Image: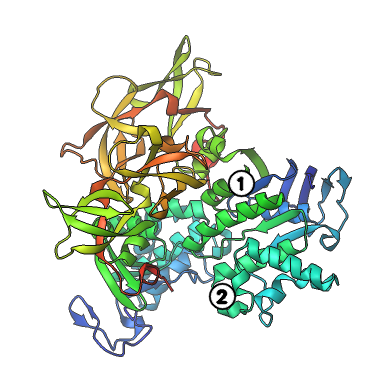
Amino acid sequence: MPRIEALDVAKRFGRITALDTTSLTIEDREYVAVLGPSGCGKTTLIKLLSGIWQPSEGRILVDGRDVTALPVEDRDLGYVFQNIVLFPHMDVWTNATYGPWVHARHKEDVDHVGTEVLDLVDMLGERGLFPSELSTGSQQKVALARALANRAKLLILDEPLSGLDARVRLDLRYALRRVVKDLGLTAIHVTHDQEEAMSVADRVVVMRKGRIIESGPPETLYDRPKGVFTANFIGESNFLEGAVRRIRADWAFVEFRSGYILRVPAKGLLEGDPVVVAARPEWIALTKEGFGNVIPGRVEGRVFLGATQRLQVRLFTSDLVSVDVPASQSLNTARDVLVSFHEANILVYPRPYEGLQEALKLE
Amino acid sequence: MIAGLLDPDAGRILLDGRDVTRMPADVRQAAFMPQTYSLFPHLTVWENTTFSPQVKGWSESDRDVLAREMLSMVHLIDRREAFPRELSGGMQQRCALARALAAGSGVLLLDEPLRALDARLRIELRSELRSLIRHVGTTAIHVTHDQEEALVVADRIAVLRNGELVEVGPAEYVYSHPASPFVANFLGEMNFVEAESFPADGGAVRLVVGGTNLMAPAREGLSGRVLAGIRAEVCGVLPQEWGAGQGVEGIVKRRLFMGRRISLEIDVPGMGLLKAKPLTANARWAKEGDAVFMTMPAEHILLFPVPKGGVAAALEVE
């Protein structure tokens, strides 16, 4: 029943800080995804949590017990890596039951565990095959079965799907989540793929530059991200820079370049505040109505995305925004359009002191 | 073979009408940009970019003008003194692109140019790549395994399978008129069911599948037993009691939140597990176990001959 706590942990290599002072609690049976761009410190964080590395500062508790100095081999956890590590000369069954076998469990025990874990990942039928006879997706399933066979209650997944084909990845996402939930495990899954993080986890932890910048349930992070970086990193967003001109009752009126104004919820805003207004491409629309929360613009480009098309619209504020409309929506030849920003689908942030571009940077 | 790195066993390759089949790679007007970028680690951004013009014996002033132009275009002019290891992955890619462009070739060959990058950065850079190449006005051939990337960057898509070109055309055309179930499925997850088709009015057919009637656009030369397909992303869901329009009833078995869209697997009696990927705003309410009406707009239903070896084999990638 592992509840994991990282208390003020940090990892420094000389003058380089891989992970700045960080605290994170992972509840028992929680599936947490740690998400961030390359070099954000996410790999460092799980190496500390799993005991592969020792933190330079801080402590790590498992169920209240201090395990900071306990090496990885003495911890009760299963580990799945991006690079699939199977013994090539052993068949699926022997690979999966390797752990219990090494621990000299009874044969019935080993048989029982092997059957159970291979059944969980849907590979029981392939028990006699060798890794070279399996697709990479199936190989990773066997690696997962092997990690589960140790009966550890904590599962560490280090980019487990990154080496796989796009389609296989989708199937395995569901398999991972199902196995973790069925067995009541605590799972920590590191990935750079936003969609993957959102679809597997109960909670997503977003990291950047060696720090955790926010965490929350996937739908909350997508719908109401707390900061501009997350708004851009998880899904895409359009950003408009403006300033609060006036506040009337529950509404703030934000003015953009060339004097265009949008009405937004006033919560937490003061007149004169420099702000950034964010809206996802699927949250804004083209309208024929010349009133309400609209800004005029001109269509500069169009990208076919399958069921939808993405229009690049140069607003008269001179900002370029992406607007997703149904692929079936035809545009009249006049390319002047009105872009409608619905109040309920607008996010407002204080303008970052380091500048918007810097605050959004992915690397 | 287009780059000249491999010789064809048969056939010819023409560049601007000129036969280059036996011409070695280094004298062809085709610049190859590999996945790994292959920048010279000991040369700066500037030196990497001017490498090819220098080898070709360009004068220093011509080289400077060219390099300046190319590096401005890829927004790296401020980092011209940096070495590759000091650059981010995205910058290295842009530097490799500048170098390829500075080689002055008529054709740019991009082999999975975004593969080494993080998922989010890839999305950002693919749009940038498209506008850059448009701006330069060069011909580009971009190899990718990512369907969405192909749709976004290209004017035209060529789908290859088992060493064979199975369809070529503008992205929108290939997406809406796929030549085979394989192409259809490759450009976006499909649902397939076998159905009996009967002629109907107005260029339509009536499909009967598992006791349900569905209308679909007719396809010339196709009648009787057919394979009907519809993309997951054009299928929506409604609460079952609101069911309206064309569709089928079922129970949600799986739900995965993916951000912009929600991926649902719906168990439909008589048809099996079908997939729908509606926009999140339209389907947020749907939970596992819910009884839903899955909409299937008639205009999006595609018809194919029933594949002889079965549907699964017709879709197999490897």
- Depth check, mark 2 against mark 1: the one in front is 2
Amino acid identity at mark 2: Leu
Disc 2 sits on a residue from what chain? Answer: A
Rendered image: mark on residue A201? 1
Rendered image: mark on residue B214? none
Report which residue position mark 2 lands on. A134
A212 lies left or right of B10:
right
- Residue A253: which quarter of the image? top left
For the question of whether residue B226 can be seen, the reply is yes
Name the element at disc 1.
loop
Task: Measuring from the top left, give residue B265's x and y in whole percent.
Answer: 46, 50
Position of residue B172 relative to residue A254, above or below, is below
Cβ atoms under marks 2 and 1 closer than 8 Å: no
How far apart in space, not on screen, are marks 2 and 1 (Cα)?
Answer: 27 Å
For the question of whether residue A283 can be seen, the reply is no
Which residue in the rendered view is the most extreme toward the left?
B202
Task: Measuring from the top left, give residue B103's x and y in whole percent.
Answer: 35, 71
Position of residue A289 relative to residue B260, above or below, is above
Q: Earlier in the sequence, mark 2 or mark 1?
A: 2
Which residue in the rendered view is the most extreme toward the top?
A249
Amino acid identity at mark 1: Ala
Which residue in the rendered view is the most extreme toward the front?
B211
Quarter of the figure with the C terminus of chain B:
bottom left
Q: What coloring was used for the rendering?
A: rainbow
Disc 1 sits on a residue from what chain? Answer: A
Front in this rendered view, residue B110 or B72: B110
